[in-house]
Amino acid sequence: MARLDPVGAGSPARDDARFTVRKGLARDACFSLEAGNFPGYFLRHRDYVLRLDRRDGSGLYDQDATFCPRPARDNDAAVLLESVNYPGHFLAAQRGGVVISRRDATAFIVRRPL
């Protein structure tokens, strides 16, 4: 299960926290996140839980690993990430991990890498 942890410049988990933003595997106007230290592994949702899995070439995987940015209402610098194949479901930090949820959404602020 993917999780959100604080990462600083000297953090040992820094390499695990780096992802390359790629053109969406299932939709060009959206994007997919490939692990920086594990090429070919993308963040995808399965059973509503976000996880890092190796790309298997299936259409379902590509949809599970594609997210579309949507503006956050109260912050111009933040985005919500909507699942391509579950419209209305957004990435949300819950229960110590990250899930896709219809009721909750976590806003992400895009920044330069550390």
Image (cartoon, helix red, strand yellow):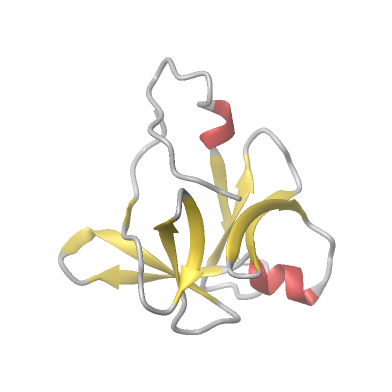
Task: Decide: is 82 above or below 4.
Answer: below
Q: How many marks?
A: 0
Task: Decide: is 6 above or below 45.
Answer: above
Q: Is residue 82 left or right of residue 24?
A: left
The image quarter in which residue 24 lies: bottom right
The image quarter in which residue 39 lies: top right
Q: Give percent across and percent down for residue 77.
A: 23, 56
Q: Residue at x 59, y 69 (%)?
A: 48
110 and 91: which is toward the camera: 91
Residue at the front extreme of this rendering: 95
The image quarter in which residue 93 lies: bottom left
Q: Residue at x 29, y 70 (%)?
A: 71
Q: Is residue 53 left or right of residue 99?
A: right
Q: Give percent across and percent down for residue 14.
A: 50, 26
Q: Give percent across and percent down for residue 72.
A: 25, 68
Q: Residue at x 55, y 82 (%)?
A: 86
Residue at the left extreme of this rendering: 74
Task: Decide: is 3 above or below 58.
Answer: above
